[in-house]
Image (cartoon, rainbow, N blue to C red):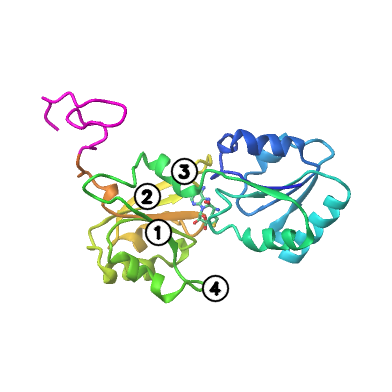
């Protein structure tokens, strides 16, 4: 059995209980060494075989899994954040399906959630934005043209931009040309939830300079949108005048 496990954004105690139990029971762990906190491996059994996928191809990962599976070992494939976001798990799952190797997926706390927690921010502020776009700049991996940063910027919703901290100048240009005003708040969050976490508050116009001054070039998210500002409306859900399935409106109080 193979368990694809989301390791969370960094801090070792931000993995799920289920994920941790799979690590404790594993005979073989393949972890994404570039971003998964090695402290998580401390909970593995002493004789657990450990591989760093940063140095491996898909074929090599599948070969290690096949071999460990043949020997009856419980296998953990440990991905950073949540495996469904830029995790390249689909190709691994398809390879396992083709070989008849059973697997499960255990979600994790994605770094865009870790970054919001670090900022004490809410992506979906009433009156500001009710949508979050998770995307990236095109790099060596292309992004379909209809999903360009510019196209998404037209919505002026909350955005969490992965894998793009090394391209801040082009990124801010695309965002502004796409429709966000230059004074729109932005934040750079480096290594959310790690001890070396760094947060930089800036604006779209200043984004690239803020990146340069802080030296942040990778392992960071760029968050953009008015959800980082001061204005928002009160929620309906918790408003005294608003009835829900669980609570009758009380009336009387001003929002
Ligand atoms: N599956 C992961 C994303 C992997 S792609 C997740 O759900 O978070 C790798 C990119 O994720 C990095 O380039 C960076 O943009 C972002 N990232 C991962 N961990 C991060 C963290 N702790 N803080 C900020 N960004 C992070």
> Of the residues under marks 4 and 3, which one precedes in the sequence?
3
Q: Is residue 39 left or right of residue 136?
A: right
- The majority secondary structure of the magenta stretch comes to loop
Magenta residues, start to end: 234-255
Q: Which residue is tagged 1?
A: 211
Say if 143 sits above or below 251 in the image.
below
Query: Nearer the viewer's eye, disc 1 or disc 4?
Result: 4
N-term-proximal mark, 3 vs 2: 3
Query: Residue 114: which numbered mark, if any?
Result: 3
Residue mark closest to the camera, 3 vs 2: 3
Say which element carries label 2: strand
Taking the spot 40% from the left edge, 44% from the top edge, the residue there is: 116
Secondary structure found at label 4: loop
Left or right of 120, for residue 232: left
**CB of residue at label 3: within 8 Å of ligand 1?**
yes
Would you say the residues marked 1 and 4 are in contact, meaning their CB atoms lie under 8 Å apart? no
Residue 2 in view in this figure = yes
**Image-based side of 216 in relation to 232, left or right:** right
Q: Are the residues tagged 4 and 3 within 8 Å (C-beta)?
A: no
Q: Quadrant of residue 84?
A: bottom right
Pointers 3 and 2 in contact (CB under 8 A)?
no
Residue that label 2 marks: 200
In the image, residue 248 lies in the stretch drawn in magenta? yes
Which residue is found at the position 59% from the left and 57% from the top?
Answer: 87
Look at the numbered disc 3 and give the secondary structure of its residue. helix
Local secondary structure at mark 1: helix
Q: Residue at x 54, y 71 (%)?
A: 141
User: Which residue is the site of mark 4?
Assistant: 140
- Badge 1 or badge 4: first in the primary sequence: 4
Q: Position of residue 47 (x, y in %)?
A: 85, 39
**Quarter the C terminus occupies:** top left
């Amino acid at each position: 059995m193979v368990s694809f496990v989301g390791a969370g954004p960094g801090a070792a105690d931000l993995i799920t209980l289920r994920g941790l139990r799979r690590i404790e029971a594993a005979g073989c762990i393949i972890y994404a060494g570039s971003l998964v906190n090695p402290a998580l491996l401390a909970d593995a059994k002493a004789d657990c075989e450990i591989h760093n996928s940063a140095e491996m191809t898909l074929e090599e990962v599948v070969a290690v899994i096949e071999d460990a599976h043949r020997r009856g070992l419980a296998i953990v494939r440990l991905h950073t954040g949540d495996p469904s976001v830029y995790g390249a798990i689909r190709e691994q799952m398809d390879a396992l399906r083709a070989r008849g190797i059973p697997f499960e997926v255990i979600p994790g706390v994605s770094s865009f959630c870790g970054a919001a927690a670090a900022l004490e921010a809410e992506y979906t502020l009433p009156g500001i934005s009710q949508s979050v776009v998770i995307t990236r700049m095109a790099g060596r991996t292309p992004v379909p043209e209809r999903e360009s940063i510019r196209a998404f910027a037209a919505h002026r919703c909350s955005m969490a931009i992965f894998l793009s901290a090394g391209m801040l100048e082009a990124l801010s240009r695309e965002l502004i040309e796409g429709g966000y005003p230059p004074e729109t708040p932005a934040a750079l969050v480096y290594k959310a939830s790690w001890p070396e976490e760094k947060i930089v508050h800036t604006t779209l116009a200043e984004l690239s300079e803020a990146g340069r001054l802080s030296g942040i070039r990778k392992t960071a998210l760029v968050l953009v949108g008015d959800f980082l500002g001061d204005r928002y409306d009160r929620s309906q859900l918790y408003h005294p005048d608003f009835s829900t399935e669980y609570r009758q409106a009380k009336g009387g109080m001003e929002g």
